[in-house]
Amino acid sequence: MHKKNGQIEIPLAGLSEGSHEFDFTCNASFFNDPHLVEAGFTRDIEVRVVAEKREHEVILEIETSTVAVLSCDICLLPVSKPLAGSFRIYYTFGELPEEDQEGSEEYRILDRSALAIDITEDVRELLFLSRPMKVTCTNNAECRLPYGEKEDEGVQPEESNSWLDSLEKLKNKYR
Ligand SMILES: [Zn+2]
């Protein structure tokens, strides 16, 4: 664990049995992972954790939400997409269950003397998992065009009718 980074921790000391809600706001730099920024996580990231403490276990329901700035797989234009992820972790004070470990759930052993649960790494992984495999524009009529060798010149989405014109020509060419 890289303790020098920021941490998202659920305090256990003094936590009574029952359900408790924790909200965090952070950003990619908090995790000190340049891949997060490369993956489009450049804006604020909201993390909500519901911790349910019981006699023999603590259940964490972790939810992330953010708006990632991705790029369209087809036309390479930037696409902002709201992303949400959720993940449940069972921390047991006893033995791990031998069965029923499936889905987006995970079982871990927790020491009874633990003062807090550090979920920083889980949140980081959840962010990557919440990223869609495919990204396409939703409101760009030109998006279906093959972009081809123009890619090298860089995409300037905000500007220029000439760019659209050349796309228009391309479109005709491929009809
Ligand atoms: Zn597109």
Image (cartoon, helix red, strand yellow):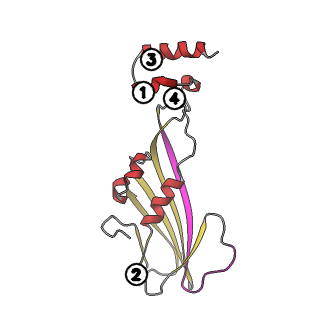
- Which residue bears the numbered disc 3? 163
The residue that disc 1 covers is 152
Q: Amino acid at mark 2?
A: Leu
Q: Which quarter of the picture shows residue 172?
A: top right
**Residue 155 quadrant:** top left
What residue type is disc 3 on?
Trp
Crowd rating for badge 4 (residues with CA inside 10 Å; few <14, some 14–19, many 20+): many
At 50% from the left edge and 54% from the top edge, which residue is drawn? 128
Residue count near mark 2 (Cα–Cα under 10 Å), binned few <14, some 14–19, many ≥20: some
Question: CA separation, marks 1 and 2?
Answer: 53 Å
Check disc 3 and report its element: helix, strand or loop: helix
In what quadrant of the picture does the C terminus appear? top right
Q: Residue at x 43, y 62 (%)?
A: 23
Q: CA distance from mark 4 to mark 1?
A: 13 Å
Report the residue marked by disc 2. Answer: 115
Residue 155 in view, yes or no: no
First in residue order: circle 4 vs circle 3: 4
